[in-house]
Amino acid sequence: MEEEMMEGGGVQKKFMFVNRKAPYGTIYALESLEVVLIAAAFEQDVSLAFLDDGVYQLIKGQNTKASDMKNFSPTYRALEGYDVEKLYVSKEALAARGLTEADLVVPVQVLSAAEMADMMESQDVVLSF
């Protein structure tokens, strides 16, 4: 794997966080976002993949009143400030849910299942939520 030396002598690793769960009803989506921010703060090469119901985490205009949970989807717009700009979404997951890139709160790269598998293979660490 390609590793870069960071300032201070540490080694930068490529981390991919895979989000497969709907944003509300469990803590997985919010926990993933918190871990992403921590990894980015430590200057790691961070990317996110959204598969299955995980694509719902990025939907614009979420109404969370019924769930009694705060809508955290706007936080994805703040990722750019942490140099987290690699967001990948499953083409198949979007299509299966009748969604398009225009429905999402942030810019993403839409990948086919084969492209997503290749992207995951290129990472040093893959964590699934």
Image (cartoon, rainbow, N blue to C red):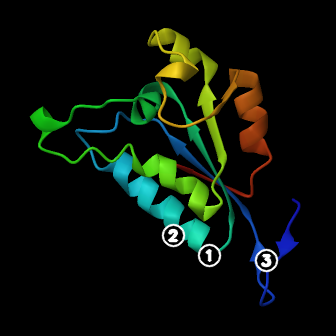
Q: Is residue 31 above or below residue 29?
A: below
Residue visible at 49% across and 10% down? Answer: 96
Residue 19's disc number: none
Give the residue pinned by disc 1.
42
Separation of residues labelled 2 and 3 (CA atoms): 16 Å
Q: At label 1, which amino acid type do we have? A: Phe
Give the residue pinned by disc 2.
38
* Disc nearest the viewer among 1 and 3: 1
Q: At label 2, which amino acid type do we have? A: Ile
| Front one among 113 and 77 | 77
Residue visible at 70% across and 21% down? Answer: 112
Task: Decide which of tag 1 and tag 3 comes sooner along the chain.
Answer: 3
Residue at the limit of the structure toward the bottom, as seen here: 8
Mark 1 packing: few (<14 Cα in 10 Å), some, or many (20+)? few
- Circles 1, 2 touching at the beta carbon (< 8 Å): yes
User: Is 78 situated left or right of 89 in this image?
Assistant: left
- SS for dot 2: helix
Residue 47 in view = yes
Look at the image and tell me in which quarter the N terminus lies: bottom right
Q: Is residue 8 above or below residue 73?
A: below
- SS for dot 1: loop
| Front one among 89 and 62 | 62
Quadrant for residue 117, please give it: top right
Give the residue pinned by disc 3.
11
- SS for dot 3: strand
Residue 69, given in percent of the width and then of the height, sits at 18, 46
Task: Decide which of tag 2 and tag 3 comes sooner along the chain.
Answer: 3
